[in-house]
Amino acid sequence: MIENLNNISKTLILSTLVIVVIQFIFASYKVNGDSMNPTLDHGDRVLVLKLNYINIPIINKKIIINNPKKDSIIAFQKIDEGIELVKRVIALPPEKIDIKNRTVFINDEIQERGAGVTNPHSDFPVILENNCIFVMGDNRNSSNDSRRFGCVPIENIDGQVAIRVWPINKFKLFR
């Protein structure tokens, strides 16, 4: 009887430690809308790897270990609206983004994924500052992205999408 309680206690402690470690490393995000189709669908649940963007609540600071890479899918919050977004990084500093004739150009080169996009709501061309990235949804014509709200400060990034966990039949690793 005591041995069983001892085993149950060890299992509970180990399980708790595993959950704490997972919550430190990953955050769960729900994809809202169709902006990331066909890569991610509305309602998908993804785990975001937070290791490169560590929040330190005591001093209210974020430590950035690695900057995002081009074409990675990131999760971030629009601070002014408190909305969680999942988008693809298409440009890094100090690249120049332009949208002309419904086509996206980065450093004057046509972007394959950027053909046929809707016209932007802000002025282009834009040259990215050191602490900003330019993001777009994969479904460019149905995406609230940097064309509308501007570049995303790197300190607003919560992490990189690592795994789609829901729906279970669409489980996928993104790294």
Image (cartoon, helix red, strand yellow):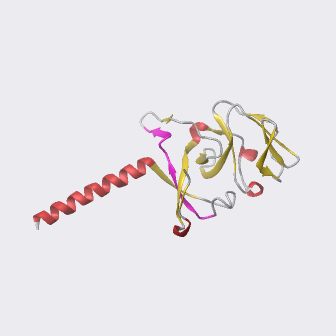
Q: Residue 74, relative to residue 171: is it above or below?
A: above
User: Which of 132 and 84 lies nearest the eye of the viewer?
Assistant: 132
Residue 39 image position (x, y, % from top left): 65, 59
Residue furthest to the left = 2
Magenta residue check for 20: no
Taking the spot 15% from the left edge, 66% from the top edge, the residue there is 4
User: Which of 96 and 61 lies nearest the eye of the viewer?
Assistant: 96
Taking the spot 31% from the left edge, 52% from the top edge, the residue there is 17
Give the magenta range.
42-57
Taking the spot 75% from the left edge, 54% from the top edge, the residue there is 140
- Count how many numbered circles sit on residues in the image: 0
Q: Quadrant of the N terminus?
A: bottom left
Quarter of image, res 90: top right
Residue 126 image position (x, y, % from top left): 77, 35
Quarter of image, res 40: bottom right
Residue 57 appears left or right of 94: left
Quarter of image, res 34: bottom right
Residue furthest to the right = 101
Residue 170 image position (x, y, % from top left): 56, 66
Residue 153 image position (x, y, % from top left): 63, 37
User: Which of 147 and 174 lies nearest the eye of the viewer?
Assistant: 174
Magenta residue check for 56: yes
Residue 102 appears left or right of 161: right
Taking the spot 78% from the left edge, 56% from the top edge, the residue there is 141
